[in-house]
């Protein structure tokens, strides 16, 4: 944890506003973090959100302009090792760099995160399950790795932290098919039979059922990763564990709501948890904290992500 001076506090306050605005489920979970972890997690989120917006939001400029913005984030991150680094043009990114340095996190992890967002900054159709998982690891599993030491969890938890990031990204993909299609992107693999047109606007009941079956396949894959991540909660110190368990159950709850509502509801609007649904999930997590048990039936890190073994920063 870096020293909390006035400048750091100002960065935290700006970051907290970003978190509250754009990640309500995680913001609610983060209230249960220790004060130091909450500050650092908010700043990490604000950095990741800015990078994601530069990848996605055409309102921020042309693709070339947005890639320049991502390059500026990279420069500010790498600037962290220099004296007076937090006085850079992007203090949030540089503060993240300082935090990662203090925690001994290899910079190849945030750099792979930024590279993955650059690759994702234009229209695309994911071709295979391997490509889907590589994408999910790049844009979210890496964030789990960066968050892990902020929570005080040891290196043994890194695969589980990465798995939770992947699971949450798969849930986001399942929820945001229509929105992503508006940007010319389809993250469900063509290998499964998915296409942008079919997933965004299925023309018949038969097509809706076929498209929804692919969403269910995606969410079942996410369930593997949630189960693996859940089994790693034991590594997180008790002062931060419940916050991550709440984040897990809320995101997992979105996917399960999509499955419950079925194809007749999916294309009528984006799935969100209501206040009562959130309260119910959170209260169960708080009153009956999960006792990690047996790992899932198959080791998702070994089976599903074996093709990523050579990626710099992927947890061994």
Image: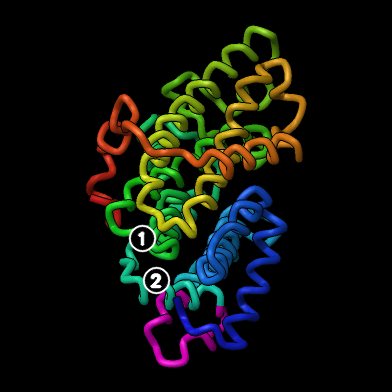
Residue 82 lies in the magenta stretch = yes
Q: Position of residue 184 (x, y in %)?
A: 61, 38
The answer to whether residue 84 is magenta is yes
Report if residue 246 is visible in the image.
yes
Residue range highlighted in magenta: 76-91
Q: Secondary structure at mark 1?
A: helix
Q: Nearer the viewer, mark 2 or mark 1?
A: 2
Nearest the eye: 278 or 120: 278
The main secondary structure of the magenta stretch is: helix
**Residue positioned 50% across, 41% down in the render:** 289
Farthest front residue in view: 287
Determine whether the residue tagged by mark 2 lies in a helix, strand or loop.
Answer: helix
> CB atoms at circles 2 and 1 under 8 Å apart?
yes
Q: Nearer the viewer, residue 91 or 190?
A: 91
- On screen, 89 above or below 65? below
Front one among 246 and 83: 246
Is residue 245 shown left or right of residue 257? left
Residue receiving disc 1? 109
């Amino acid at each position: 944890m870096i020293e909390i001076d006035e400048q750091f506090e100002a960065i935290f306050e700006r970051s907290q506003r970003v978190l509250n605005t754009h990640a309500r489920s995680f913001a609610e979970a983060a209230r249960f973090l220790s004060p130091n972890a909450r500050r650092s997690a908010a700043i990490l989120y604000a950095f990741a959100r800015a990078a994601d917006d530069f990848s996605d939001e055409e309102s921020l400029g042309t693709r070339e302009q947005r890639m320049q913005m991502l390059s500026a984030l990279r420069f500010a991150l790498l600037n962290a090792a220099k004296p007076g680094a937090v006085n850079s043009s992007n203090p949030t990114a540089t503060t993240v760099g300082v935090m990662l340095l203090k925690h001994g996190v290899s910079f190849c992890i945030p750099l792979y995160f930024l590279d993955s967002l650059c690759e994702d900054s234009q229209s695309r159709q994911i071709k295979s399950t391997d490509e889907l998982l590589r994408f999910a690891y790049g844009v979210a599993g890496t964030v789990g790795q960066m968050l892990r030491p902020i929570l005080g969890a040891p290196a043994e938890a890194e695969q589980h932290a990465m798995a939770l990031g992947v699971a949450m990204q798969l849930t986001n993909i399942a929820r945001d098919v229509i929105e992503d299609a508006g940007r010319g992107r389809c993250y469900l693999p063509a290998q499964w039979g998915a296409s942008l047109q079919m997933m965004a606007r299925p023309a018949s009941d038969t097509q809706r059922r076929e498209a929804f079956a692919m969403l269910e396949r995606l969410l079942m894959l996410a369930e593997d990763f949630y189960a693996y991540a859940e089994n790693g909660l034991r590594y997180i110190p008790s002062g931060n564990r419940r916050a991550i368990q709440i984040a897990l159950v809320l995101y997992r709850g979105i996917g399960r709501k999509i499955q419950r509502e079925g194809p007749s509801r999916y294309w009528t609007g984006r799935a969100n948890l209501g206040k009562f649904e959130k309260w119910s999930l959170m209260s169960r997590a708080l009153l009956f904290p999960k006792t990690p048990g047996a790992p899932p039936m198959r080791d998702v890190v070994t089976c599903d992500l074996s093709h990523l073994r050579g990626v710099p920063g992927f947890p061994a």
